């Protein structure tokens, strides 16, 4: 396996830092912290370069905030200067690792994403169900197709990632000690007064680097499922993954083997309540939709989010510009479900 030993200078090159700054600011140019940074963009970028060259770079403490959608999640926000560093790092080492990721690792990769995952799921369900072969049912329902799906979720994934395991996985490709020093700095960054064990495990939700490292960590699981278990119809989106198969018994065997692999190799475990084997006829929750054979529906949580935004807009608690940005983002996603009439009703109800 090819390794990389002298790539640190690519990360701190001023050309890379400029490109990273442009990426980090995209869609956020009106934010106060962007405006402040850009009072002296070149000076700030050269300051970051100087800190990287001298290895004096220290990330600012993370800012923590809570979101409820409706699940409560703790999101960590890095300072803008640190986000520039994150983009600079991923711009250089991202392509190195992307070459070894499996095709059906769908999250946070160029040319992949939610829509790609949906299309692959559709292809897999056709294969497993023999193009929609109907199972006998009393409802005359043509969505009662044959086949099963193991729908899995990893318990507290981002909180439980082991730093030593992650660094050892990165070392398989990256042998540059200065790059590893920078990665260690990013991994150990935390909020002021945060938990001590955060130094050894866990990654903050919200960082670009956390999303990237998440794929490196679970690439080991991808290889185990694809090459050891030889599961043909496997898809992963961050820590949610599905395996489709004709036999629920085979999926039960794989479920036990996967949980054992996660515990032994990655110090993780499947979420007992959210990991289950489901007949394809009942619909499978994946990447924001409940997927049936002939149609897909939006999750109730997704609908609740946009209705909440509409209520806030009607009360004057968010601006028209902020609401339109949210609604357009939601609609771009919702149009992939069978939801045309629903979207129309929501639009008609707007003031």
Image: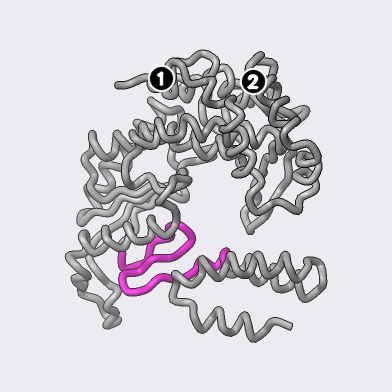
Picture coordinates of residue 149, whole percent (x, y): 31, 55
Picture coordinates of residue 106, whole percent (x, y): 40, 48
Q: Nearer the viewer, residue 145 or 183?
A: 183
Q: Is residue 137 left or right of residue 199?
A: left
* Helix, strand or loop under label 1: loop
Q: Nearer the viewer, residue 244 or 84?
A: 84
Q: Is residue 291 left or right of residue 108?
A: left
Vertical relation: 150 (above or below) 33:
below
Badge 1 crowding class, 10 Å Cα cut-off, few under 14, some 14 to 19, many 20 or more, is some
Task: Residue at 38% x, 44% y: name it.
Answer: 105
Task: Residue at 55% x, 68% y: name it.
Answer: 300
* Helix, strand or loop under label 2: helix
Task: Residue at 38% x, 57% y: name it.
Answer: 116
Of the 4 image quadrants, the one containing the C terminus is: bottom right
Residue 114: image quadrant is: bottom left
Q: Mark 2 and mark 1: span between their CA atoms?
A: 18 Å
- Magenta-colored stretch includes residue 292: yes
Image: magenta residue range: 280-302
Of the 4 image quadrants, the one containing the N terminus is: top left
- Magenta-colored stretch includes residue 251: no
Q: Nearer the viewer, residue 88 or 145?
A: 88
The residue at which mark 1 appears reads as 4
Picture coordinates of residue 248, whole percent (x, y): 25, 53
Q: Nearer the viewer, residue 207 or 269?
A: 207
Picture coordinates of residue 220, whole percent (x, y): 36, 31
Residue 191: image quadrant is: top right
Q: How many marks?
A: 2
Task: Residue at 57% x, 64% y: name it.
Answer: 301
Marks 2 and 1, the one that precedes in the sequence: 1
The residue at which mark 2 appears reads as 52
Badge 2 crowding class, 10 Å Cα cut-off, few under 14, some 14 to 19, many 20 or more, is many
């Amino acid at each position: 396996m090819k390794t990389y030993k002298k790539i640190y200078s690519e990360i701190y090159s001023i050309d890379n830092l400029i490109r990273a700054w442009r990426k980090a600011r995209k869609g956020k140019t009106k934010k106060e912290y962007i405006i402040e940074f850009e009072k002296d963009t070149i000076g700030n970028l050269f300051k970051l370069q100087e800190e990287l060259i001298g290895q004096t770079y220290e990330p600012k403490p993370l800012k923590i905030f809570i979101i409820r959608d409706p699940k409560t999640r703790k999101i960590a926000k890095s300072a803008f200067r640190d986000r520039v560093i994150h983009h600079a790092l991923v711009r250089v080492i991202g392509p190195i690792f992307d070459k070894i990721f499996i095709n059906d690792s769908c999250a946070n990769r160029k040319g992949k994403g939610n829509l790609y995952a949906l299309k692959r799921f559709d292809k897999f369900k056709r294969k497993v169900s023999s193009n929609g072969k109907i199972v006998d049912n009393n409802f005359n329902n043509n969505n009662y197709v044959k086949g099963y799906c193991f729908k899995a979720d990893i318990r507290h994934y981002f909180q439980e990632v082991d730093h030593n395991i992650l660094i050892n996985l990165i070392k398989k490709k990256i042998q540059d000690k200065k790059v590893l020093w920078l990665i260690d700095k990013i991994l150990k960054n935390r909020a002021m007064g945060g938990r001590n064990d955060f130094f050894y495990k866990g990654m903050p939700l919200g960082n670009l680097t956390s999303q990237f490292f998440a794929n490196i960590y679970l690439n080991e699981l991808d290889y185990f499922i694809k090459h050891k278990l030889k599961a043909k119809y496997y898809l992963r989106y961050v820590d949610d993954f599905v395996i489709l198969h004709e036999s629920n018994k085979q999926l039960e065997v794989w479920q036990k083997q996967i949980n054992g692999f996660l515990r032994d190799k990655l110090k993780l475990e499947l979420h007992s309540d959210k990991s289950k084997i489901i007949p394809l006829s009942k619909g499978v929750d994946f990447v924001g939709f409940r997927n049936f054979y002939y149609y897909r529906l939006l999750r109730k949580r997704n609908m609740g989010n946009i209705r909440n935004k509409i209520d806030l807009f009607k009360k004057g608690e968010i601006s028209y510009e902020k609401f339109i940005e949210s609604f357009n983002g939601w609609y771009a996603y919702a149009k992939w479900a069978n939801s045309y009439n629903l979207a129309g009703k929501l639009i008609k109800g707007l003031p």
